[in-house]
Image: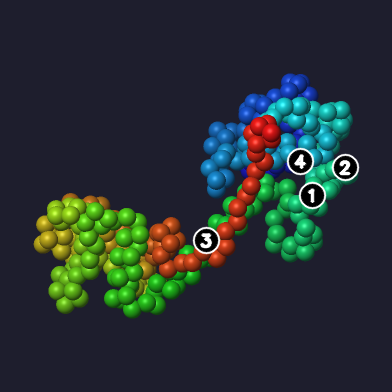
Amino acid sequence: MASPTWDEYMKPVLDVLAGSGVLPLRDLCDQVAVRAGLSDDELRETIPSGQPRYRNRIGWAATHLTKAGALERPRRGQYAITERGRGLAMEDKPLTEERLMEFPGFAAFVHGARPVAASSRGNDAPESSAEAPEETIGRVAEELQALLEADLVDKLRTVDPLAFERLVLKVLRGMGYGKDGSLDTTKASHDEGIDGIISEDPLGLDRIYMQAKRYQDGSNVGAQEIRAFIGALVTHQGDRGVFITSSGFTQSARDAVRQANARIELIDGQRLAKLMVASGIGVQVKSVTTVYALDDDFFDDL
């Protein structure tokens, strides 16, 4: 069952406040969640910022109702219903954004916040009531990152194999490995199945061994390559390793890792792309958007 959209929370918000007087937003969210009969799964859902989805949507429902004159804020962070709100709560039909547009204050708020007409957003744009503004920002950011990661995977499969090894070490270094020791590649002619060695301490007593394979899509790493890597770890008296590829791993390769005595981490192309974005390796910041919120404490201190 899909979680209620922000406009579907408006009627429950009015109903709760009609019988409760003034409520702080946190208590309002709790009571609306009960009235809406949210499941445990719906209560646990979060938006990209980590905030519970239902609280975010109820907050935006309260904001929209306030702009329409259906709610008021008698004190900071608290809400109360108005006579207009009581009238809307008694209407025998769903309360929608279109209904709120009949009130000049809400219409001015919407036109100021959305300068682009809905008709110009294209047929693929989501309905405005499907998600709260912060959810839209988070969703678009996730979609853009997914496209970037796909481009990164394609790019990884075109680089020179030796360059891929150097790239992998840059990513590991960006993640903080080798910070207190060293992180080096081995010579191509004498790597003995090891492409890089991470020393986690200045004396090199704590080591992680790395193998990197730049393969094309569909040429996945199999059990034979994993067993060869395990053998290389034994030769170097190592018990920890990371195997990184631009493609993927077969099920038999993953089974070989589970059966190994050594602790081995497998990183495929998609996961490597995510790590590159998180570490800022091979990517550039295109734009940054800062979302501001009203600082009530500032005005209280004036």
Viewer-closest of 167 and 257: 167
What distance separates the C-alpha of mark 4 from that of mark 3?
Answer: 30 Å
Instruction: Say whether marks 4 and 1 touch (CB < 8 Å).
Output: no
Alpha carbon distance from label 3 to label 1: 28 Å
Q: Position of residue 59 (x, y in %)?
A: 68, 37
What type is the residue that disc 1 sits on? Answer: Val
Return the disc, 2 or 1, that comes first in the chain's sequence: 2
Residue 20, visible in the rendered structure: yes
Whether residue 69 is situated above or below residue 276 in the rendered picture: above
* Disc 4 element: helix
- What amino acid is labelled 2 in the image? Phe
Q: How many angstroms separate mark 2 from mark 4 (CA)? A: 11 Å
Check disc 3 and give the amino acid type: Gln
Q: Which residue carries the number 3 mark? A: 145
Residue type of the residue flagged with mark 4: His
Which mark, by number, is residue 41? none
N-terminal label among 4 and 1: 4
Q: Which of marks 3 and 2 is nearer the N terminus?
A: 2
Q: Which of the two discs, 3 and 1, labels the residue nearer the N terminus?
A: 1
Is 289 left, or right, of 100 in this rendering? left
